[in-house]
Amino acid sequence: MIGHKDGQFVNVIKQRHTISARCHLSNVATALLLFSICLIGCERRVWENSLDSPDQLGLAVIDAINQKDIEKLNQLRVQKQAYLSWIYPAFPKSSFSPDFAWENLNKKCNIGMKRWINQYGGRNLSFVNIRFDKPTQNYDGFQLLRGTILTLQNPAGKKAELKILGSVVMMKNRYKLLSYDDG
């Protein structure tokens, strides 16, 4: 009987160690899962409304201009938090404060969006293509596609090349506008 009780005691100890090891692994797995979800959620906030390609971005810009939708145009560009937290710090040092640089960029964009909607809005334009005639600049964590030229076509079939967009930011194969040209 004593041997049987000792055997039970040893089995209980083994079960506790097994359960303890499983709980520890489960806690580690849960922590890693929560950390991964947080990272995914944070990146989505930064890149909300980003698109899969420059062509998708160009098409979205033309659609927003056709609909005279300034809110949609605004959503297609990098927002303040992303600009201040990782774009501005990656640029060469400046004598301007980050907030001052953002305010100037934001003002330029607001003027440009209004100007391009007033000039081209509601005309039923079609997207043809988007290209970049300046070299790409590499920064820590992203690239700037520069010299943006947007080609569109009117309902009569006439094509036009517009320089109404600033650089395009590419990060992890996702695209957003850095700015709109203010004309």
Image (cartoon, helix red, strand yellow):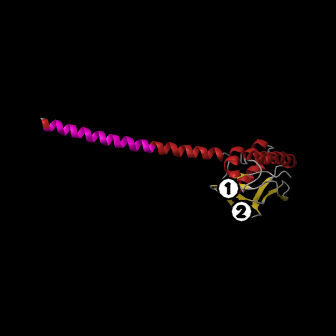
Type of the residue with mark 1: Met
Q: Main secondary structure of the magenta part?
A: helix
Q: Which mark is residue 130?
A: none
In terms of depth relative to the viewer, which is nearer, 159 or 141? Answer: 141
Give the image location of residue 106, x and y in percent. 78, 46
Type of the residue with mark 2: Thr
Q: Secondary structure at mark 1?
A: strand
The residue beneath circle 2 is 136
Q: Residue at x 50, y 42 (%)?
A: 34
* Residue 116 as seen in the image, left or right of residue 129: right
Which region is colored magenta? 3-29
Give the image location of residue 73, x and y in percent. 76, 46
* 170 relative to 21, above or below: below
Verify whether residue 17 appears in magenta.
yes
Is residue 122 among the parts visible in the rendering?
no
Give the number of callouts.
2
Give the image location of residue 44, x and y in percent. 62, 45
The image quadrant of residue 137 is: bottom right
Q: Residue at x 35, y 43 (%)?
A: 21
C-alpha distance separating marks 1 and 2: 10 Å
The image quadrant of residue 150 is: bottom right
Verify whether residue 140 appears in magenta.
no
Graded by Cα atoms within 10 Å as few (under 14), some (14 to 19) or many (20 or more), the crowding at tag 1 reads: many
Is residue 146 among the parts visible in the rendering?
yes
The residue beneath circle 1 is 170
In terms of depth relative to the viewer, which is nearer, 165 or 16? Answer: 16
In terms of depth relative to the viewer, which is nearer, 10 or 157? Answer: 10
